[in-house]
Amino acid sequence: MPGRPRPGEFELIGELFAPLAADEPGALGLLDDAALIAPRAGFDLATAVDTLVEGVHFLSSDPPFDVARKLLRVNLSDLAAMGARPRVYLLGLAVPDGIGFDWLRGFARGLASDQARFGISLAGGDTTAISGPACLSLTAIGEVEPGRSPLRANAAAGEHVYVSGTVGDAALGLRALRGEDLGLSESGREAAIARYRVPEPRLELGMALLASAAIDVSDGLIADIGHICAASGLGANVEAARVPLSGAARSALGRGAVEIVDLLTGGDDYELVFTAPADRSDAVRAAAARARVPVARIGTMTEGEGVSVFDTANARIAIDRAGYRHF
C-alpha cells in the first residue's frame, strides 16, 4: 500500500516539526521568520553546522529514524569538542519527491527521541523540494562559559594526545553495509553498523574536561589530529598500538580484512581527540570517569608539523591518506 502523500510545506511543518519546538519559547511556535534566542548571562553561544547528503553521508536504505539522530548527533559532537551544553538547533531539509510523508515522519520521530535524551529543542529552519539526492542540514547552538572552549590552536609541545572510546568502527560499519565480508561475528557487524548510523556525541566528557585543545573525529583520527597540529603550528607523534580498538575492529585487523591505516583514517567515529599537559593526566582520568567514557593516551604533541604514526618497533607507518576529504 502506498504511503501517505507528502503534504504542503506549512502543513508538514505544523504536523511534524512544530511539536519539536514546543519546549523552546524562543522558537515562537515556528510561526515567525526567525527565532529569538537569548544566551544566559555569563555564557557565550557555540554554534556548529553540518550537512548530510544522501549517498555521501548516509545510505538511501538507512532508516529515517537513524538518519535524523545522526544528523543531530554529528552537530552535538562539534559542541562537545567546544565544551558546550546543547540549547537549540535549526533544521534545513532539501528533499526530492521520492522522500514521502512516512519517511519524514520517521525522521521527525528520530529527532524527538534525541531531543529528549540530549535536552535540546528545535528553534526554526527551512524546507524545500529538490530534484537531486536529499540534503539535510542542521545548525546546533550551545552555551559555554567564556574562555572555557579547548580551541585547536591552544595545544602545546609536550602535551599528551588522548582519544575517547574506540576508533575505526564506523568505517567497518559502512564497509559492512556495502556488502564487504570482513569476517565479523553477527554481533560485531551489527555493532559496527550502529556506530556508523548513530554516533555517540561525547557531550558529558567535553563539558567535564579541562583540555588545552580538542576536536571531534569526523574526517578520521589522523586527519583530525592534523587539524589540531595545523592550528597550533605543531606536530604530533601517535603510537598505533595505543589507539583503542573494539573487539570487532581487532578481529577484522587480525584476519587481514582491514589494515591499521584503514581504521586510523576511516572517519565518522565522532569521538573526541584532545590534548592536555602531562601533569593533568590524573585530572583527565577523573573527568573521563565522571563522564563514564573511556579515554586513552595515544601520543604526544611535538615541535614541527604533521602527524607521524609509529608501530611497536618505533618504525614509522606510512600513511598515504589522512582521512576523508570533501574536495
Image: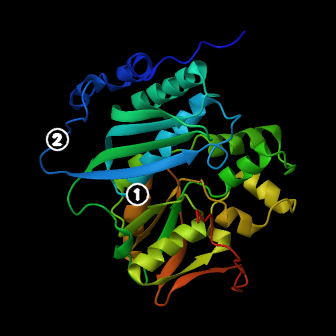
Q: Is residue 13 above or below residue 170?
A: above
Q: Residue furthest front?
A: 131
Q: Residues within 10 Å of mark 2 (few under 14, many from 20)?
A: few
Quarter of the figure with residue 228: bottom left
Residue at point 83%, 42% (across, down): 185
User: Label for residue 38?
Assistant: 2
User: Label for residue 81?
Assistant: 1
Residue 120 visible to the viewer: no
Q: Nearer the viewer, mark 2 or mark 1?
A: 2
State the SS at label 2.
Answer: loop
**Residue 181 horizontal/vertical position (percent):** 87, 49
How far is mark 2 from mark 1, CA to CA?
A: 22 Å
**Residue 196 horizontal/vertical position (percent):** 64, 46
**Residue 132 horizontal/vertical position (percent):** 62, 41
State the SS at label 1.
Answer: helix
Residue at point 53%, 44% (across, down): 200
Numbered label tally: 2
